[in-house]
Amino acid sequence: MALIKKFTQFVESPGNAATGNGAVSSLPKIETRGMSFFYGTKQALHDINLKIQDRAVTALIGPSGCGKSTYLRSLNRMNDIIEGTRVTGDVLLDGEDIYDREVDVVSLRKRVGMVFQKSTPFPKSIFDNIAFGPRIAGLTKKSELQSIVERCLKQSALWNEVKDRLKDSAMALSGGQQQRLCIARALATNPEVLLMDEPASALDPASTARIEDLIFDLKQNYTIVIVTHNMQQAARVSELTAFFCMGRLVEIGQTKQLFTNPTEKETEDYITGRFG
Ligand SMILES: Nc1ncnc2c1ncn2[C@@H]1O[C@H](COP(=O)(O)OP(=O)(O)OP(=O)(O)O)[C@@H](O)[C@H]1O
Ligand SMILES: [Mg+2]
């Protein structure tokens, strides 16, 4: 099916900028419709209706425990690995249900890559970290792997710092460099969507600024969904912001509008620091 066939190609589509009134246009890259999520009997997400725009950054904000990570992980079925979890409703990628029985989860995760809060390089060389995904996909030709490694390290703004030490262990890199390496690794399988769960929360201000610059560059070619506790960061990097509270989507709107003139009182209370 198309979801499986398409994973290696970049999807050409118009910019799909958000419309002026904070609503979103009709061609989302990802859409959840009436989506609920359960850990066993505990319901963590309730009836989420959300459209994620293509080639834009969408920030997810909200108090601890409100379901941001759960929502993010449900977009590439990372929650599948947690026993007893269940999703109801629809999660659509380019209009196709990613929970359809015929979907190949490995192919899905190539299309929808993920970067975690804590950088998680493999205890391998810098080169082998990035070549890992392409090798699993069957690529063996050294020259092709070399060009992928170089492209991804350039895209993640790490090339100049590591180009002379590609054989060194990734564990010897600084925290900020490791996080950029993880972004490079996520880019190596040519994803269309990048999910980032608090990618800069463990980093110093200079490394955080580099990651934010990187997100800004990457959105030309990728759809990015980022969870952040840092509202200044959400304001700096995202076009759209979604505010979650207690497992519900309270509101989504253009970032500027949501931070200056939220529709819901709950959102206002959160962004003004009255709770959360
Ligand atoms: N593996 C799990 N098993 C059971 N419950 C879980 C599991 N992971 C998360 N939860 C629960 O689901 C709810 C949402 O958690 P989630 O991690 O998505 O929140 P979050 O918004 O990302 O919070 P934070 O900002 O602290 O990272 C919480 O009540 C949490 O305790
Ligand atoms: Mg979380």
Image: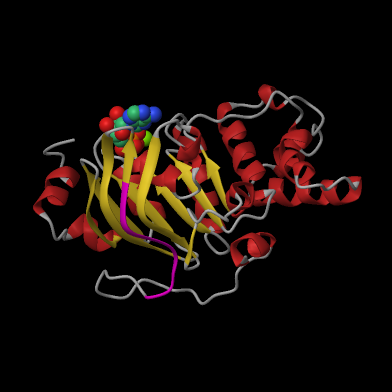
The residue that appears at 33% across and 32% down in the rendered structure is: 40
Residue 65 visible (yes or no): no
Count of numbered tags: 0
| Picture coordinates of residue 91, whole percent (x, y) | 41, 57
Look at the picture and state if 191 lies above or below 124: below
Q: Quadrant of ligand 1?
A: top left
Residue 8 counted in the magenta span: no
Task: Judge from the rendering whether residue 234 lies leftward or rightward of residue 206; answer left or right.
Answer: left
In this view, which residue lies farthest toward the front? 101
User: In the depicted view, which residue is nearer to us: 107 or 125?
Assistant: 107
Quadrant of the rendered structure where residue 168 is? top right
Task: Judge from the rendering whether residue 45 lies leftward or rightward of residue 96; answer left or right.
Answer: left
Question: Main structural element of the magenta stretch: helix, strand or loop?
Answer: strand
Residue 98 visible (yes or no): yes
Task: Judge from the rendering whether residue 110 lies leftward or rightward of residue 139; answer left or right.
Answer: left
| Picture coordinates of residue 151, whole percent (x, y) | 74, 52
Quadrant of the rendered structure where residue 27 is? bottom left
The residue that appears at 51% across and 77% down in the rendered structure is: 14
| Picture coordinates of residue 214, whole percent (x, y) | 55, 50
- Look at the image and tell me in which quarter the N terminus lies: bottom right
| Picture coordinates of residue 41, whole percent (x, y) | 28, 33
Give the residues in magenta: 26-36
User: In the depicted view, which residue is nearer to us: 102 or 51?
Assistant: 102
The residue that appears at 60% across and 69% down in the rendered structure is: 11
Quadrant of the rendered structure where residue 229 is? top left
- Look at the image and tell me in which quarter the C terminus lies: top left
User: In the depicted view, which residue is nearer to us: 27 or 172?
Assistant: 27
Look at the picture and state if 96 lies above or below 237: below
The colour style of the image is secondary structure
The residue that appears at 19% across and 46% down in the rendered structure is: 271
